[in-house]
Image (cartoon, rainbow, N blue to C red):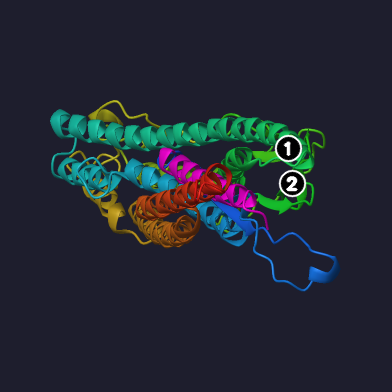
Amino acid sequence: MSTFSGLNTAMSGLNAARLAMETAGNNMANVGTAGYTRQRADFLSVGSVASTGLLASRPGVGQGVALTGIARLADAHLDARVRGTIALAAQSDTRAEALTNLEGVLREPGENGLSALLNDFWAGWQDVSNQPGETSPAAVLIERAKAVANRIGLSRTEISDQWEAQRQSLDTMVGDINAAATAIAGLNEQIRSTVASGGTPNALLDQRDLLTQNIAELSGATVRELPDGTIDVLIDGNALVTGNTVRPLEATGALNFGGAGSPPSIQWAHRTGSPIALQSGRLAGALAVLAPADLTGTGGSLSEAAKSLEGIAKELADRVNNVQANGFTVAGDKGLAFFGFDATGNLSVLAQGAADLATSSTPGGNLDGSNAAKMAELGKVPGGPDALWANLVIKIGTTTRAEAQQAVSTAVAASGAINAQQSVSAVSLDEENVALIANQHAFQGAARVMTAVDEMLDTLINRTGLVGR
């Protein structure tokens, strides 16, 4: 190796140290950038020049160092684990949030809950039984009955509002997925071109990974990497994105609670009529909440709750009206219906005053309040409206607690997966500072080698032959 080649060796060391410091600096600059994966400059020792002829066996010295590329420190297995766990966590979180909101509709326990209002209603009948035909207790009873009917109607309206809000969220989430899929298709094209030209598409890969993670959170999508640097994004085994091609989704089904149309579902825009079987993600959680009620009582939480409320209202109307029909007013007339219940599930109070209350068990019993006393006992009947309401409250409460625990468990799993991913790909300021210091010393060392070679060459070129002059 010639003396001049020492300059090239030192120069390669300077360049290597500079590139390593620039890489560390870039990592530190992006320490707060969402989705950024830390990078590392990889180098390879350059071997000595091959020698031939009589001196071929002489050992040679290497020619320094060469950059082989800027490695992106990502782990495909950990990335897939993060996508899977956050999809499950998002599904559980959506269901738990919906059930928590539904539990708030019940207002139990509390003075505004239906159980308290029913207790007041039955107590009103007891007061009427003690003063049949009197205006004041009858007026109080009717107002309490209206409070019960209003509470049932308001609860059903709130459930309907929650259902429609969840239905609107389907359209929003589908729009977000389609927009992210379009962006991934564009990044696929850029990455393929960059890889084919020998470039390093690290920043593009970071953007694409962040988008795939967002899609996975919403839909439970999986990712398949291809040799040309592109990926396929799959939902239920079918490609949402393949190369630069996108197959968009669409939300279909009824828009209003109890309205016309099929149950809400997610379908391929190019192949309607075949709902996608989503297994995880926020879409799956929302669809589970929006599912219609069924005969087994395992349908969507909102529809099941509304169905139960309708059953409670009907049970209340039937039992009260039945006792009314078996009694007589103070005028001796047969009792008429106290509650009205229509086909839409609305409960209303038909009684106007004391003259409409069948307080007596026999005609002409002006001071007989025995039938009103029977009415007051309806609150204790097994299978009555009070028991049905208690069962609904218990069912929603236990289901909400179970879903909340499931949401916590899946969130812990997702957090663990993210922490494992970040331990590999996240920027550590301590590590980058150490890298800066180490490469700074390497740069100084390479500069010192260059200075030494320069001094040697100066002696050989400018001072050889000066001795003895």
Amino acid type of disc 1?
A: Thr
Is 449 a magenta residue?
Answer: no
Q: Is residue 454 left or right of residue 267?
A: left
**Could you tell me which residue is drawn at 65 percent across and 61 percent down?**
62
Residues 304 and 98: in front is 98
Q: Which mark is residue 194?
A: 1
Name the element at disc 2: loop
Q: Give percent across and percent down for residue 185.
A: 72, 35
Report crowding for label 2: few under 14, some 14 to 19, many 20 or more residues within 10 A (C-alpha).
some
> Badge 1: how crowded within 10 Å, few (<14), some, or many (20+)?
some
- Image disc number at residue 222: none
| Side of 133 relative to 458 (left or right) | left
Can you tell which of label 2 and label 1 is closer to the viewer?
1
Q: Are marks 2 and 1 in contact (CB under 8 Å)?
A: yes
Instruction: Identify residue type, mark 2.
Output: Gly
- In the rendered structure, the answer to whether residue 236 lies left or right of residue 422 reads right
Residue shown at 54% from the left, 42% from the top: 462
Residue 223 spot, x, y in % from top left: 68, 51
Report which residue position mark 2 lands on. 229
Quarter assignment of residue 82? bottom right
In depth, the one of 297 and 332 nearer the eye is: 297
Q: Is residue 145 above or below residue 65?
A: above
The Cα atoms of the two marked residues, 2 and 1, are separated by 9 Å
Range covered by the magenta-colored residues: 1-29
Answer above or below: position of 271 versus 223.
above
Q: Residue at x 37, y 29 (%)?
A: 350
Q: Main secondary structure of the magenta part?
A: helix
Dot placed on the residue nearer the N-terminal end, 2 or 1: 1
Residue 175 is left or right of residue 373, and the answer is: right
